[in-house]
Amino acid sequence: MAFAHCIAATDGSARAGVLTTAHGDVPTPAFMPVGTAGTVKAMTPDAVRATGTAIVLGNTYHLMLRPGAERIASLGGLHRFMDWPGPILTDSGGFQVMSLAKLRKLDTDGVTFQSHLDGSTHRLTPARSVEIQHLLDATITMVLDECTPFPATPDEARASMQLSMRWAERSRAAFRPRDGYALFGIVQGSVYPDLREASARALRRIGFDGYAIGGLAIGEGQATTFAVLEATVPHLPADAPRYLMGVGTPDDLIGAVQRGVDMFDCVIPTRAGRTARAYTSGGVFNLRNARFADDAAPLDPACACPACTRHSRAYLHHLFKAEEMLGPMLLTWHNVQYYQDLMRGLRTAITERRLDAFAAAVRAGWAHEESP
Ligand SMILES: [Zn+2]
């Protein structure tokens, strides 16, 4: 079965469709919870599935260092290792080398770095990153790229983007195509429309199964993120999936879907869940706030997750005050459920051609914003 993206409906620039993969279908627009080290933190695979999640993300950097890609391959691949038979997208490792590793040294062929775990030396090249993702049995492999720091001058951004385009070509050459598997290119170019266009054109010349937009949500602000999307999306193939990497808040997701993005990943719902922050249809709540101590109401009456249907705000508040691990577990489940419910709502609204009205109604519901 071939990897395919079937677009069933459009509303403005937004699209609703289905990704067909070797490991199952993914309705789009799709949100991928981040399963950093072979686990979506604080959730069992059954809980992740129960939220309607169709695809998760795995981190090459973490898995190559611990437990090691060859070990995971010998144990049957990442799907079996983490009990997630569904589709998995793995990142290339490049972003985390730059953000986590010690003593990293970038050259034209790759990056050499020391593990943040034990200081051991490792090297990541485009070919090695693709090989690791093959060993993990990633459904969707990402090319190795350099995430251009923000801010960057036009000259810095151009040099960085051109390096990423050379690496994209090497990643393509190293990738072993199989039915239902995919390789995605990554558009770079910082905040400069001409560089984003040049990057998109370079990737199209090489040819990929999908196109990611990288180097965003790293401090440029939402208005700039959206402006870059508007400058990039028209230069991507109409039918291929578009993936906005590392984004974002529910508001970011709505705005990006309205601008033609099909796929997202972000640590926000899982990280927030571990720190008592809840994303709800009423806005953002901090469950540590003392005002919840006697609040018998459900966290979000519109949500069907266990945190909302079986517990009170007072109980969730108590769990965080008592530092019980069930608190992060329940709130992570809720946040991922909220994100997946939002994606389902977006897909339905696109299909029914009422996306703008849906977006306005969701945003109007967010009356509440509590500081962390
Ligand atoms: Zn809930």
Image (tube, rainbow, N blue to C red):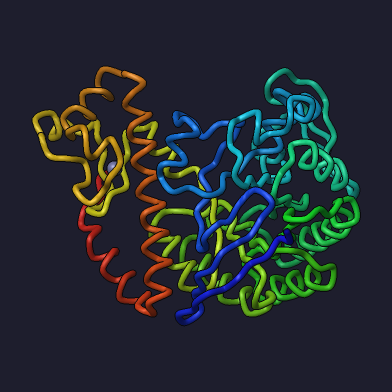
Q: Tally the marks.
A: 0
| Image quarter (top left, top right, bottom left or bottom right) of the C terminus | top left
Q: Quadrant of ligand 1?
A: top left
Point out residue 108 in the picture as x, y percentages from the top left corner.
89, 50
Q: Quick check: 283 above or below 292?
A: below
- Viewport quadrant of the N terminus: bottom right
Image x and y of residue 164, in percent? 80, 57
In this image, 244 relative to 49: left or right? right
State the residue at coordinates (84%, 73%): 205
Residue at position x 65%, y 36% from top? Answer: 79
Q: Quadrant of residue 278?
A: top left
Examine the rendering and report whether any part of residue 188 can be seen: no
> Can you give x and y, in whole percent of width and height, for residue 155 in the image?
77, 65
Residue 48, above or below 339: above
Furthest toward the bottom, the residue is 12
Q: Residue at x 28, y 36 (%)?
A: 306
- Decide which of 88, 58 is in the foreground and name it: 88
Q: Nearer the viewer, residue 168 or 10?
A: 10
Quick check: 134 left or right of 98? right
Residue toward you, 105 or 200: 200
- Coordinates of residue 170 in the picture (x, y in percent): 89, 55
In the figure, residue 274 lies in which quadrant? top left
Residue that protrudes farthest toward the front in the picture:
1
Please name the residue shown 21% across and 33% down the image. Answer: 310
Q: Is residue 223 above or below residue 23?
A: below
Does any portion of residue 169 appear in the rendered image? Answer: yes
